[in-house]
Image (cartoon, rainbow, N blue to C red):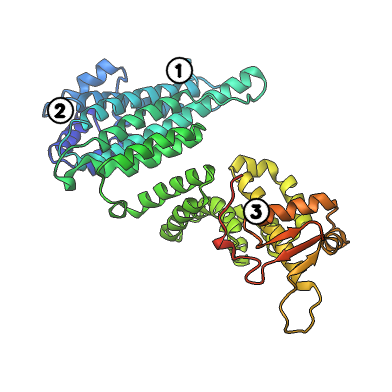
Amino acid sequence: MKPSIFADAVLTAAKHNDGHSLAQLFAIGGPVAASALLELGDPRPARIISALRKCSGYLAAPWEDMCVHHLTSVYSFALASSLVGEAVDAEGKTRAERLGEAFEAYNAAVTAFVRFFATLSPGRWAVPLLRILCLNLRWLAVQADAASLAVTSVAQGQRTSSQPNRRLEECARQLNKAFTACIADRNPELADSRKWGTYEVVGMVFKTYFRLKSVALCRNILRAISAAALPDLAHFPKSQQVTFRYYVGVLAFLNEEYDRAERELDAALAMCHRSARANQALILTYLVPVKLLKGSLPHPALLDSDVGEKLHVYTPFIAAVRTGDIRTFDTALHTHEATLVKRGTFIAIERARDVALRTLLKRISLSLPRPAPTAPPPTRIGLKTLHAATSGAVVGLQYGDKELEWILATLIYKGYVKGYIAHERGVLVLSSVLAFPLLRDVPIATT
């Protein structure tokens, strides 16, 4: 496809407000890009402009700038794809340098379009093009940064601990502009509004912020969404709903708002396509710890499925909470600490230890002798009895008397146990009615 023919295709699609065709034309990969590359000719920008202007129409702003930058990016990306490691092309440039050029050129194309899109009314027709531009820009940013990091690591003789994400940070700024262009639309005709692109872009913004470890910036996006008159989330595609609710759930989880996290992650999992196993695993990575805190243990079949392969780190904790095996819990917490910290779930799992302690105390209570087989469990348990039960060979917890009292007082304070400690008599007095409240009714303490 000659540049002039490419320009004609852009003009035709723009004239008919055909955002889907424009998205195919401006994709960094695919048959259109490959065809345009074959007949590009001289890749210098001035020459590309001359070739584009041989089209049958007039390339008004922003289309000419977009075409030039896009074709330049496609050319640089093609050269990068032919290089490996530190190899250089005919101009002496490495893969990392070519990917950097591809990103910069494509970013210029996105800049031109976002500036145009922000003034477009009605603008919903252009949302598919905005989507592909943002997706491609983010992908190029990740590729360019990874290539630059590899070169830096080789030059230093070791892999650095820092992650130079210069292009991804620039991409984040560009995505923010795209988000603003969507959410700030004041077109009274909501059906044709740019606002329909909001959640598509928000998903990319969140994904980028999480990769940059700038999670706090997501709060600004959520505040802007709550203040905007957007269509109801239920009217957007399910894929966008799942992405948004997943990230909102994770943000709530990291902020220790476990009730909200459970609602959002439950909703995301319910709407997630059954074949999207990787996405289900991502959701369950945060939902399983919340369920542990709520006493809702996942079915063993889940952990044996292909989704459960990424959740095996939680298996010993689930077993410990189910049986009250504190030693297993503590061993697993020490063994998997690095993994849990990396995922951001360590604090929640650590809090689930109280749930395991509740299970242990309940099992001890149920195992004590009763006056008759049908009699309820005793409501008064001697602290010495508890000390003997927890320090025996089966449980194996070497708690001192004061430490055991402190643990019991903590469980009572947090609502896991209803009762009190009669310190002078050395007795734990349990409530005669629901001494061990249902975990779903116990507020999760975050202190």
Foreground mark, 2 or 1, reads 2
Left or right: residue 86 versus residue 323 is left
Q: Quadrant of the C terminus?
A: top right
Left or right: residue 14 versus residue 426 is left
Image position of 193 with respect to 293: above or below: above
Image position of 434 with respect to 168: above or below: below
Image position of 433 with respect to 86: above or below: below
Q: In this orientation, which residue lies closer to the viewer: 27 or 340?
A: 340
Left or right: residue 214 versus residue 297 is left
Q: Earlier in the sequence, mark 3 or mark 2?
A: 2
Mark 2: amino acid: Cys
Question: Spatial distance from mark 3 to mark 1, Cα to Cα?
Answer: 72 Å
Give the SS element for disc 1.
loop
Mark 3: amino acid: Tyr
Question: Spatial distance from mark 2 to mark 1, Cα to Cα?
Answer: 31 Å
* Residue linked to disc 3: 413
* Residue linked to disc 1: 90
Question: Spatial distance from mark 3 to mark 2, Cα to Cα?
Answer: 77 Å
Measured as percent of width and height from the top left, residue 408 is found at: 73, 56
Q: In this orientation, which residue lies closer to the viewer: 274 or 11?
A: 274
Q: Residue at x 21, y 22 (%)?
A: 51
Measured as percent of width and height from the top left, residue 120 is found at: 17, 34
Image position of 425 with respect to 365: above or below: above
> Do the CB atoms of the residues marked 2 and 1 lie less than 8 Å apart?
no
Give the SS element for disc 2.
loop
Foreground mark, 3 or 1, reads 3
Measured as percent of width and height from the top left, residue 77 is found at: 41, 28
Q: Residue at x 29, y 33 (%)?
A: 180
Q: Residues within 10 Å of mark 2 (few under 14, many from 20)?
A: some
* Residue linked to disc 2: 55
Which residue sits furthest left? 57
